[in-house]
Image (spheres, helix red, strand yellow):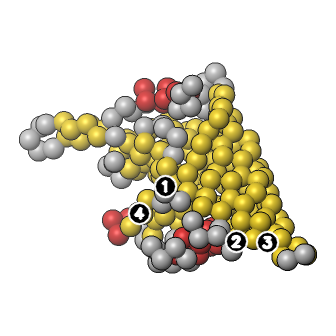
Amino acid sequence: MNTHSTRNWMKFCAIAVLLVFGSGVAVAQGITVAMQVRFALSGVKQAGDSTASVKVTNKDILNALNATGQFDFASNAQIVFLSLEGELPSIAVREGSGTNATTTDISDFFFLTEPQEIHSPDHLHNWAIYVYNFDNHNGTSFSVSGLTFLHAGPINGPGIGTVSRDKTLTAAVNGSGTIDGANMVVRGTVNGGSAKSEID
């Protein structure tokens, strides 16, 4: 089953952007929608023969990525979902804004899978099971899943006309993992918004 097919209808809105230059030549390029996403998970971890409370937020995820020695993300860096032409998003970290923004792919450590999705007749409302998989390969990991609600709407970006794509995301999730090598179980929310379109 192609898990991306149900959202590919949105391509009729803008399969490509046509940029018209002084020469009059039109160049087609793909459109990526960048959505800021926040994770708020809490639960219990094993602490020897006892237990302790645990929280996992964006800041904790960034710290876990920094612990790999491959990154040096600031605490205010953004976790973003990048969806090219309505496909299932990849996950990246973005620092800065505008033309000064730096986007770092973290899909080797953080990725989504989508076992199932359904949509409303107008395709503006989508319900999906998203599985959010994180592993810094250094003792901190989680796999949480749950019903994710995606609302599509008009999105704009610099130099790009209006496109209709997934604009907000809300999910209630639960699952398990490890934190600093200790087993944990967690539940919480994932919320996405402030979506902008970009030229890929």
The local secondary structure at tag 2 comes to: loop
How crowded pointer 3 is (Cα within 10 Å; few <14, some 14-19, many 20+) is rated as some
Please state which of the two labelled residues, at mark 1 or mark 4, is closer to the viewer: 1
Q: Amino acid at mark 2?
A: Gly
The residue singled out by tag 1 in the image is: 107
In this view, 37 is above or below 49:
above
Which residue in the protein does label 2 denote?
A: 181
Name the amino acid, label 4: Thr
Q: From what the image shows, is residue 15 above or below residue 121?
A: below
Along the horizontal axis of the image, is 41 left or right of 93? Answer: right
How many numbered tags mark residues here? 4
* Sequence order check, earlier mark of 1 and 2: 1
Please identify, in this view, whether the residue under mark 1 or under mark 2 is nearer the observer.
2
Residue that mark 4 sits on: 103
Measure the alpha-carbon separation of dots 2 and 3. 13 Å
Q: Residue 54 got which mark?
A: 3
Q: Is residue 67 above or below residue 158?
A: below
Query: Residue placed at 13% from the left, 37% from the top?
Result: 25
**Residue 116 position within the rendered picture, expressed as x and y whole percent measured from the top left:** 66, 32
